Image (cartoon, rainbow, N blue to C red):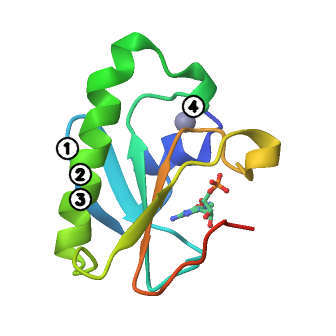
Amino acid sequence: MSECIFCKILNKEIQSEIVYEDELVCAFKDINPTAPVHILIVPKTHIENLNDVQQHHKELIGHVFVVAKELAKKFEIDEKGYRIVVNCGADGGQTIDHLHFHLLGGRKFSWPAG
Ligand code: 5GP
Ligand code: ZN
């Protein structure tokens, strides 16, 4: 059995507030939101991080972005704007070693990010 927290969420072994799910991805609310809308879009395959993304994942990764813009519309952040973040590795701020995409909105973000 996987020890990965996100695999456990995908397998429904850990409860989460799922807002979207299909055969390729699951999206749920971040447990510690840093914006009024903070959703994690998680591929159902366990890929550790962006370093492990391969050519055959191209359709999956493209799908993530289509889901992201649909969720942005659903949560009504599409018009004002939003941010999608992928943290990779320790310096990138990655804390869960299962590839995921943060969809953040509902407030204004600064750039460059700290
Ligand atoms: P990272 O820092 O790896 O890019 O992002 C991991 C995110 O997962 C963090 O924003 C953190 O709050 C969130 N997170 C960690 N554990 C859980 C959990 O058990 N449930 C949910 N819904 N989010 C989690
Ligand atoms: Zn996993």
* Secondary structure beneath label 3: helix
Q: What residue is at 74 percent from the left and 39 percent from the top?
A: 89
What amino acid type is highlighted by mark number 4?
Answer: Leu
Q: Looking at the image, is mark 4 or mark 1 earlier in the sequence?
A: 1
Observer-side mark, 1 or 2, equals 2
Is ligand 1 within 8 Å of the beta carbon of the residue shown at mark 2?
no
Name the residue that disc number 2 marks: 67
Q: Looking at the image, is mark 4 or mark 3 earlier in the sequence?
A: 4
- Is residue 94 among what the camera can see? yes
Q: What residue is at 18 percent from the left and 71 percent from the top?
A: 73
- Is residue 1 among what the camera can see? no
Q: What residue is at 60 percent from the left and 77 percent from the top?
A: 110
* Mark 2 burial class by Cα count in 10 Å: few <14, some 14-19, many 20+: some
Observer-side mark, 3 or 1, equals 3
Observer-side mark, 2 or 3, equals 3
Quadrant assignment for the N terminus: top right
Q: Can you tell me which quadrant of the image ligand 2 is in?
A: top right
Cα gap from disc 3 to disc 1, whole angstroms:
15 Å
Name the residue that disc number 3 marks: 69
Q: Position of residue 49 (x, y in %)?
A: 60, 33
Cα gap from disc 2 to disc 3, whole angstroms:
6 Å
Q: Do the numbered discs 4 and 3 sit on residues whose CB atoms are within 8 Å?
A: no
Cα gap from disc 2 to disc 4, whole angstroms:
18 Å
Cα gap from disc 4 to disc 1, whole angstroms:
21 Å
Q: Position of residue 5 (x, y in %)?
A: 60, 48
Q: Do the numbered discs 1 and 2 sit on residues whose CB atoms are within 8 Å?
A: yes
Q: Quadrant of residue 80?
A: bottom left
What amino acid type is highlighted by mark number 3?
Answer: Lys
What amino acid type is highlighted by mark number 1?
Answer: Asp
Is ligand 2 within 8 Å of the beta carbon of the residue shown at mark 1?
no
